[in-house]
Image: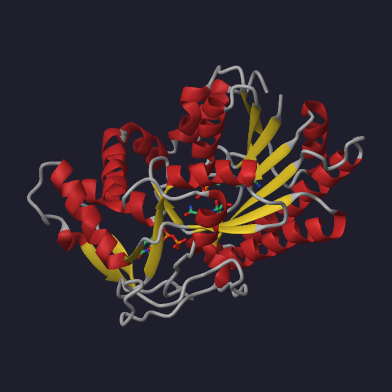
């Protein structure tokens, strides 16, 4: 049996990865490790409780001793590392927390894994440290609508694009990516790094654009659009990201980097209008009834203009492609948030943070 730790498993993307692995690999033991910060929500994983190959551990990735002990106790073979502070706006207000978790936390996991795996007779044989990163480390692309190849520009981020992060969030992720690669180059640790575009889908914390706006539209609250709404993001349905992580964890080459994206660029203002129309339709409101909620506000400091990922390496080498068209993905997403009002209300009321106490305090 393989034992795999998935860090940040109670967050948005992590919960989808944990669910996929628990169901698809009944012979693996999946340890979901999470500190349960404001972004961690155990009700994202409610359906997995009690399954024999699933286990939750509350831990801070910065706790080197505790993580090393966990690796020894459970004989951990693989780490899929998603735990991070993930919101750009928070990083602008509080960069220290981002350096602590994203940089020091990643280094702490690497160092503990090195100590444990190097103590084994087989060393790094059959082991894997897979680090999940973002396209934001590459910086920002220009906006150029004269291209026929893509609606918003000729250039894309590839695996060889030099790092040029602008926000404290992307700077901290870039730093962690460098540490992961350094552990391969220096100690021979079998590492992989992937850089993915913006994800959307169920269980995303409502500080991020799409869930925040769906909830505001439902309650007819203003929709704060930064700047002119001209910034471009490349959107991927979260379950497609989880599938890519599965393929890369099992088939990706050690020391490689893979970009993950869906060739799906949208200007913020356009995607916001799609979300408004979809919410209005599903709630039975007249088409466009809530367009007047759009409220232009002061731009985000250092707001990256455009992200666009070229994921052809992943398609050519490992055969991964997104499975969902955007229209289908956004419909599923809006429907999920409208159908799961209690999930959203538990977050806005703060009740979701009591869940750990009720479910786990006694057994951990
Ligand atoms: P999220 O904020 O929803 O979840 C992060 C999780 O990490 C939470 O459960 C939180 O409790 C946990 N965590 C935070 N600090 C921790 C610590 N010190 N110790 C242990 N756990 C801790 O984030 P997400 O959107 O699911 O992103 C997951 C990963 O994917 C991050 O590494 C992020 O950089 C990367 N990523 C995200 C996107 C995106 O669009 N959301 C795109 C590309 C890459
Ligand atoms: P976000 O979901 O925070 O992801 P990221 O900053 O990592 O791309 O934001 C997506 C885009 O939407 C980004 O260009 C900023 C913009 N945005 C708004 O215009 N208003 C908002 O309230 C938020 C949260 C984001």
Indicate left or right for 340 with 100 as reference.
Answer: left
Which residue lies at the image location 68% right of the left edge and 37% below the top edge? 59
At horizontal 42% and vertical 75% (from top left) the residue drawn is: 305
Query: Is residue 114 visible from the viewing direction of this image?
Result: yes
Residue 264 figure quarter: bottom left
Location of residue 240 with respect to 317 vertically, above or below? above
In this image, 148 relative to 18: left or right? Answer: left
Q: In which image quadrant can residue 72 be found?
A: top right
* Residue plotted at (26% across, 51% down): 327
The C terminus - image quarter: top right
Q: How is the image coloured?
A: secondary structure
Q: Does 254 sit left or right of 341 as displayed?
A: right
On the image, the x and y values in percent for residue 281 come to 14, 46
Percent from the top left, x then y, of residue 316?
A: 52, 56
Quadrant holding the N terminus = top right
Choose between 83 and 218: the one closer to the eye.
Answer: 83
- Percent position (x, y) of residue 135? 53, 63
- Furthest-left residue in view? 286
In this rendering, the count of numbered labels is: 0
């Amino acid at each position: 049996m393989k034992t795999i730790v998935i860090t940040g498993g109670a967050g948005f993307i992590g919960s989808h990865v944990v669910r996929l692995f628990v169901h698809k690999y009944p012979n693996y033991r999946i340890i979901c490790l999470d500190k349960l910060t404001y972004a961690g929500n155990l009700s994202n994983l409610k359906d997995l409780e009690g399954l024999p190959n699933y286990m939750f551990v509350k831990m801070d990735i910065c706790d080197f001793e505790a993580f090393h002990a966990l690796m020894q106790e459970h004989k951990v073979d693989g780490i899929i590392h998603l735990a991070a502070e993930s919101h750009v706006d928070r990083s602008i207000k509080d960069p220290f927390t981002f350096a602590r978790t994203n940089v020091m936390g990643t280094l702490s996991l690497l160092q503990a894994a090195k100590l444990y795996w190097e103590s084994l007779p087989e060393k790094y044989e059959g082991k894997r440290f897979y680090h999940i990163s973002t396209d934001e480390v590459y910086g920002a692309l220009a906006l150029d609508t004269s291209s026929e190849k893509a609606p918003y520009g000729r250039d894309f981020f590839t695996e060889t694009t030099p790092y040029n992060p602008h926000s404290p969030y992307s700077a901290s992720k870039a730093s962690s990516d460098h540490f992961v690669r350094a552990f391969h180059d220096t100690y021979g640790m079998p590492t992989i790094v992937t850089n993915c575009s913006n994800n959307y889908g169920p269980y995303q914390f409502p500080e991020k654009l799409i869930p925040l706006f769906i909830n505001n539209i439902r309650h007819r609250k203003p929709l704060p659009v930064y700047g002119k709404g001209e910034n471009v993001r490349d959107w991927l349905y979260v379950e497609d990201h989880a599938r890519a992580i599965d393929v890369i964890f099992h088939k990706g080459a050690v020391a490689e980097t893979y970009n993950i994206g869906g060739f799906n660029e949208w200007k913020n203002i356009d995607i916001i209008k799609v979300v408004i129309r979809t919410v209005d339709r599903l709630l039975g409101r007249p088409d466009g009834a809530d367009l007047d909620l759009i409220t232009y506000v002061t731009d985000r400091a250092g707001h990256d203009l455009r992200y666009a990922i070229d994921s052809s390496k992943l398609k050519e080498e490992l055969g991964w492609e997104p499975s969902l068209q955007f229209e289908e993905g956004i419909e599923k997403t809006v429907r999920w948030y409208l159908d799961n009002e209690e999930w959203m209300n538990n977050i806005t009321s703060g009740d979701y943070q009591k869940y750990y106490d009720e479910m786990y305090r006694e057994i951990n």
